[in-house]
Image (cartoon, rainbow, N blue to C red):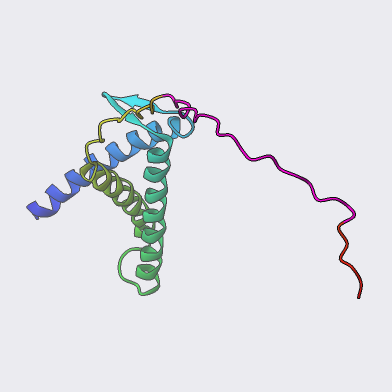
Amino acid sequence: MALGFVVLIFFIIGALISLFLTFVCISAWHKEKVLFGHTITPFEARCFIGFGLFGGLVGLIFGIIMLVNHMGPETDIFMWPIIGYVLGSLGWGIAYATNQKDPAPRVEPVQPPPLQSAPQRPATQRAEFEFASWNDEEPHH
């Protein structure tokens, strides 16, 4: 009984955090937002909400399966999508936050030195060229 109560408390806290972060992510949908010193990009906001919606869909399907098989009260079907949304969104957020790598230091591209013209070779004297004459037909036998 005590374990169920602790799980319920953690779920309520998680649901409130997920609700708060959902509103933050909606506001960061098109433009980055800063929350407690952390920048939330539109990509992160869309992923948070998208994974929450996916989790909600899985929860809805699970609730329908439970309802069809008479495995609990009919009113529980509304609880499963909420559980799925909270687990999907917070699950993605926790996984994303724990797998963040320190960004590599920015490396500025090195500009190559300006091209230098190749040293000029001394001009060499060429033998004069003679064009062939138009009268150079071979004699007919």
What residue is shown at x 81% (from left), y 51% (from top)?
Answer: 132
Q: Residue at x 41, y 40 (%)?
A: 43
Q: Quadrant of the C terminus?
A: bottom right
Residue situated in front as seen by the camera: 23 or 132: 132
Using the rendered view, name the quadrant where residue 81 is placed. bottom left
Q: Is residue 51 located in the magenta-colored stretch of the structure?
A: no
Q: Is residue 66 above or below residue 126?
A: below
Locate residue 5, reporting x and y percent.
Answer: 13, 49
Side (left or right) of 17 relative to 6: right
Q: Locate residue 128: give its quadrant.
A: top right
Marker count (numbered):
0
Place of residue 87 in the rendered image (x, y in percent of width and height, measured from the top left): 29, 51
Residue at horizontal 44%, vertical 25%?
Answer: 116
What residue is shown at x 41% (from left), y 28% (from top)? 32
Quarter of the picture containing the N terminus is: bottom left
Q: Position of residue 30 (x, y in %)?
A: 49, 32
Main SS of residues in magenta: loop
Residue 138, position as x, y percentages in the image = 86, 66
- Between 119 and 96, the one nearer to me in the picture: 119
The boundaries of the magenta stretch are 114-135
Q: Height in image: 97 above or below 74?
A: above
* Residue reaching furthest to the left: 2
